[in-house]
Amino acid sequence: MKTAVSFSLATRYYCPSCGRSYAIDQHQTFADCCLQPLFTDYDLSAITRDKLHHRRQDMWRYHELLPVQDSRHIVSLGEGWTPLRKLSATSQALGLKHLLLKDESTNPTGSFKARGISVAISRLKELGIEKCIMPTAGNAGGALSAYAAKAGIQATVVMPRHSAETLKAECDALGAELILVDGLIDACGKKAREIAAQSGATDLSTLKEPYRLEGKKTLGYEIAEQLGWQLPDVIIYPTGGGTGLIGMWKAFQEMRTLGWITGKMPRMIIVQSENCNPMIQMFDTGMLPDSFEPAPSVALGLAVPSPFAKDQIQKTVRESSGTAVTIREQDLATGIREFASREGILLSPEGSAAYMGLKKLIEKDYIQEDETVVLFNTGSWYKYR
Ligand SMILES: *Cc1c(COP(=O)(O)O)cnc(C)c1O
């Protein structure tokens, strides 16, 4: 007898520290048992990768591995399946043979935040949730405003006052309620929690719900598929809250279990600006020194003073034998100009951080010339005006 094939193979949410299960058919927040983000578990015996042929050219091609139960609830603007560009001129200049750019600036609303938000808003729609709120440095708020508008869900976005004008105007034009706060994203998070407690809006803060992580995970599936089911040796990721980093690492484990990939896993590198680099400062001891004083960065998405998922970020870097790199704040502008003049591509400040991090690692002999390296451009330069 043939049983119906499920649209999603998700079976449960679980705490990555103690393994405790959380019900898949209800809205979930985070693992309150161990104060960790929730991970989603799937029945990984039920899908082969040849199923992917002829699928839609966006991240929903991996729908079995996402938590949305019914295709009718998908809220999509065409996110994902972004180009993995060969960087010939930069490869040559830096003495590398295989340097690639995963260019996420081509996503709806101009950043990779679209991936996570598409899954989160789809799931909220599926659960009949009508109101949501999110603290953001800027890009996540823009994505939230767009997907919430399409879904007919009410969105409130809480953003630092110092964020770029375009990022603020975008939320407003898309019909979201915009609240500006003096301070970094942690201050916005506090404000968002206060408002949520009053209004009952669902809080979509980074990794305080399980859906955005699964959406960002598709980065890992795409890189593997675009490289013919091979993984690169090194991935350089400009890190704020760590969603993409943790998500990719989860995707690689899943693909290994699925038998879609074999062999060595990439070394996962995180890059932050000196203005706010808690993950680098914590790297050795797991603790922030008393002297840590976070300041705003031009790389808005990286200025997260106290990432909720810091344990999982550290675990990913350690397990992958990766490392953590700090770059100087003024390097962000230098990197944008240098990269643009060689490649004709404008990086977001965060993408520039990844590029300057790569240069630093090459200087330290951390990367060998024949290794395959994937750099991330996580957002669009055009939004930082
Ligand atoms: C949010 C953001 C980041 C950081 O992403 P995480 O996955 O949360 O670490 C990097 N770059 C840009 C452009 C962003 O908007």
Image: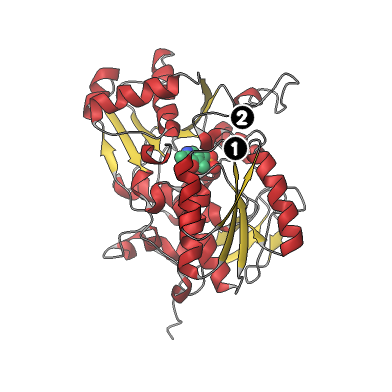
User: Looking at the image, is mark 2 or mark 1 earlier in the sequence?
Assistant: 2
| Residue 287 location, quadrant | top right
Q: 89 left or right of 346?
A: left
Q: Image height check: is 129 above or below 96?
A: below
Q: Image height check: is 162 above or below 250?
A: above
Query: Of the numbered discs in the image, which one, if any, rests on residue 279?
Result: 2
Of the two numbered discs 2 and 1 in the rendering, the one whose residue sits closer to the viewer: 2
Residue sitting nearer the eye, 337 or 354: 337
Residue identifier under label 1: 313
What amino acid does circle 1 point to? Ile
| Residue 275 location, quadrant | top right
Say whether residue 295 is visible. Answer: yes
Q: 93 left or right of 217?
A: left
Looking at the image, what colour scheme do you see?
secondary structure
Q: Are marks 2 and 1 in contact (CB under 8 Å)?
A: yes
Which image quarter is the N terminus in? bottom left
Q: Image height check: is 352 above or below 115?
A: above
